[in-house]
Each structure stands twice: as structure tokens, then as C-alpha cells.
Image (tube, helix red, strand yellow):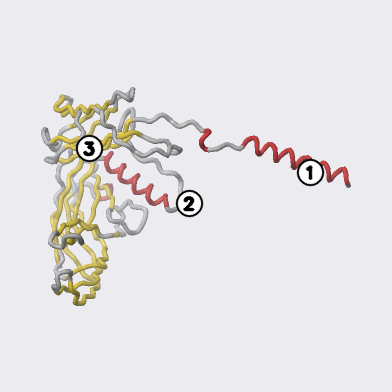
Amino acid sequence: MIIRHRIIVSCLLVFSFVACETTEKIDDFPLRPSQLVVNCFFSEGNIWEFQVSKSLSVLDNADLKYIDNATIKLFRDDLLIETLVDQDPDGWYRTSSNLPEADHKYSIEVSSPDFEKVLLSEDIAPQEVPISDVSIIIKDSSFQKWIDYEGREYYGGNVEGSFNILFSDPANIENYYSLSVFYLDSVYDYEDPSEIQIQKRLLYISSDDSAIENDEDSYNQLLLRDVLFNGQDYQLKVDFNDWNSRKGREYYVELTSLQRAGYFYKKSIDDYSSAANDPFAEPVQIFCNIKNGYGIFSGFFTTVFGVSF
């Protein structure tokens, strides 16, 4: 029995030494080389805005920094129309000339002397998909009298209801959409009460429509595509609850027509956010349509329709 006990102890010691020898710190793993990253969503008539940065390894603790020596070549229908080299103080590259036009193909070449590869991408500026009509149905509401910062009375409270949104989907092509609802809020500056800022406040909305592709029940942006209603007039019912409502408030329904790349980029961001709160979820890879790097370059067109109750 004594001999057996000694053998067991010896084995445990051997395994302990092996375990110690194979332990590695995260710092011992090599970091993957950084690659250029460019992000740009563009729409007809709006200025061009590009954000250029570099990728970081998941083990890299460095701060994400913008690239200030990038060169962006912009093409329309394969013809060079602009070269951007100057970065604005906020880190973005911008130009107000050669604005995007619907149904034209745009492409980019992005380079930096600090990186070997040139980033390439292309996409089309889509046409507007107008909202035909929006009606609002109030299911429940509760208001009471309040006093604002300037001593003025107003009625505020809770509103629960739904929007019925009608739009016409273009035929014979795949269409992708995001939809959100917002209101405009006046915000006082605490240091200078005479200064008022107008801010866009998104509502959390939900829908049980089978065309909605979000994974969770409630979002401030719903994603859908026209697989079930290609080329048809489509009415979408969207539920909402505004816990900080005011009587007479105007809501704005925002329907954005996306290209395929932009849609799946937003969808992957959406899925990533959902998976981040679920320890059992599978890893989500962010969609990318940039060759030789990372990021997104895609067109969109937004329609806004106001409705009040």
C-alpha cells in the first residue's frame, strides 16, 4: 500500500510539472499584422465621407487610430472623378464635389504608404423607395401636466401604439431595407439655458411581420428584404411604446433603401450585438465588401414620412 501511494503521488507531481511547462501568457502569442479599414455609406446628393483606420488583433490593447496619410481615389462608372488626401480635424476625409447620383456605379482605391496593399471596392447608389402613407393607431396612453425648465406647462406621459406603413417595392430586383422611427427633442444646455439643441431620438420598435429579419423582439432599427413582396405595394405594421411622449408629438418614419452589401453589413452588426449578450452564441463575423482590407463601401437612399396623433 505504501509503494502504491508513492506511485500516485509521483504521477501527480509529473502532471503538475507538465501543466506548468505548457502554460502560456496571452502576450506570448504573435499579433496579426494590421490592415487598412475604410468605411463609407453614400447617398444621392449627400457629401462623400470616408473613415480610414487600421485593424487591430483581438489581443492588441492599442487604441484605434485614424490613418492621416491615406489617399482615396473615387471613380464613377470606372472614370476617376476625385482624389482625396486631406483629412478633417475629426479624422474623416470629405468632399462636397462630384456628389453621388442614383443608378451610377462608384468605386474606390484606398492606399497608405504604411500599408502594402491597395483597398478596392465598388457599389451603386440606389434610387428612392418612397413611403406612400403612414397611419398611427393608439392602443393606450396616459398623460399628466408637467412644468418645463422655463416654467411652461405641457402634457407628457406614455403612448403605446402601432404604425401602418405603406410603400411600393420596385419590381424585378432584390431590395433591402432598414426602418426606424424617431422624434425631434429640444434639449436645454445646463450651462446656458438660452441655448437649445434639437436632437433625434429613436424609438424602440418591434414587428411580428415575417419579412423582418432581426433576431430579437425590439430594436430601434428593423431590417427586411423583399423576398415575400417583390414588386408589390406592401403594408408593414410596426409596434412602439413611447414612455416620454408629449401630446401632439410628431413622429418620423424613416425607410432606408440599402444595397446588398450595406444590408448584410448592418445585419452582421445587429447579430454581433445580440451575440455579445449571449455566452452560448456562435461568433459573428462582421460583413465586409472591401478587397485587401476591411470595412464597408455601400450606397443607400432614405425617405422620411411624418405623422402625428
Query: Which quarter of the picture shows residue 136?
Result: bottom left
Alpha carbon distance from label 3 to label 1: 64 Å
Q: Mark 1: few, some, or many residues within 10 Å (few <14, many ≥20)?
A: few
**Figure quadrant of the C terminus:** bottom left
- Contact (CB < 8 A) between labels 3 and 1? no
Q: Judge left or right: residue 307 versus residue 202.
A: left
Helix, strand or loop under label 2: loop
Disc 1 marks a residue whose amino acid type is Val
Residue at position x 39%, y 40% from top?
Answer: 285
Which is nearer the eye, 190 or 34?
190
Alpha carbon distance from label 3 to label 2: 35 Å
The residue at which mark 3 appears reads as 92
The residue at which mark 1 appears reads as 9
Which is nearer the eye, 219 or 13?
13
Disc 3 marks a residue whose amino acid type is Trp
Residue 71 drawn at (x, y percent)? 23, 27
Query: Which quarter of the picture shows residue 94?
Result: top left
Residue at position x 87%, y 43% from top?
Answer: 3
Residue at position x 14%, y 68% from top?
Answer: 248
Residue at position x 20%, y 42% from top?
Answer: 300
Figure label count: 3
Q: Mark 2: few, some, or many residues within 10 Å (few <14, many ≥20)?
A: few
Lower position in the chain sequence, tag 3 or tag 1? 1
Residue 224 drawn at (x, y percent)? 28, 50
Residue 64 drawn at (x, y percent)? 34, 38
Label annotation for residue 34: none
The residue at which mark 2 appears reads as 279
Q: Judge left or right: residue 81 versus residue 270.
A: left
Disc 2 marks a residue whose amino acid type is Pro
Lower position in the chain sequence, tag 2 or tag 1? 1
